[in-house]
Image (cartoon, helix red, strand yellow):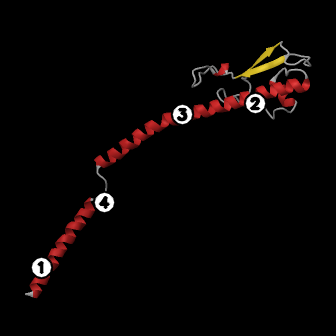
Amino acid sequence: MKAELGCRQHGATDSVRTSLRARRVRQKGFTLIELMIVVSILLILISMAVPIYNQSIIRAREAVLHNNLFTMRSLINQYTMDKEKAPQSLEDLVSAGYLKQIPIDPFTGSRDTWVVEQEDVLMSVDQTQPGITDVHSGSDAMSSEGTPYSSW
């Protein structure tokens, strides 16, 4: 009797093991629905991230433009006060050692597109020659603030 009971228990255990193996075999992969849901979620996240990334690139370029303009305007003033004459071109700042090189406009991608303002106004009493008083970007694009970069 014990032998019969042992066989029954053993047989029951084998059938449980077989059904567990069958379940494991069936559960190894993902269903098509699960994959479609995961891909859909990824696409939604990517579609939200791309505009934020593009906006951050534009803001970084705007920050570089602000910095370049501030630096060049400051150096134009320093050159004018030191030399008692305003620079006639941005190359004068480079040749006098105020700039290592003319910076690249981040929106036009060129060093040659800077728009300089030359006025006959003298900035100091000692100044003997007028020249460049201001510099602007050569880009016609609009900023995130709604103003053209050429007006900065």
Number of the front mark, 2 or 4: 2
Q: Earlier in the sequence, mark 3 or mark 4?
A: 4
Specify the label residue 74 is tagged with: none
Specify the label residue 28 is tagged with: 4
Number of the front mark, 3 or 4: 3
Report the quarter where the C terminus lies.
top right
Asked whether 25 or 39 is in front, the reply is 39
Q: Earlier in the sequence, mark 4 or mark 1?
A: 1
For badge 1, the amino acid type reads Arg
Q: Residue at x 75, y 30 (%)?
A: 71
Specify the label residue 71 is tagged with: 2
Callout 4 secondary element: loop
Q: Is residue 36 above or below residue 80?
A: below
Read off the residue under disc 3: 54
Number of the front mark, 3 or 1: 3
Query: Gap between marks 2 and 4, in whole Å?
Result: 62 Å
Tag 2–tag 3 contact (CB < 8 Å)? no
Q: Is residue 88 left or right of residue 56?
A: right
Read off the residue under disc 1: 8
Q: Earlier in the sequence, mark 3 or mark 1?
A: 1
Q: Is residue 96 left or right of residue 4?
A: right
Number of the front mark, 1 or 2: 2
Q: Residues within 10 Å of mark 4 (few under 14, many from 20)?
A: few
Q: From the top left corner, tell me how far across and down residue 39 is, in percent.
A: 37, 44
Q: Residues within 10 Å of mark 1 (few under 14, many from 20)?
A: few
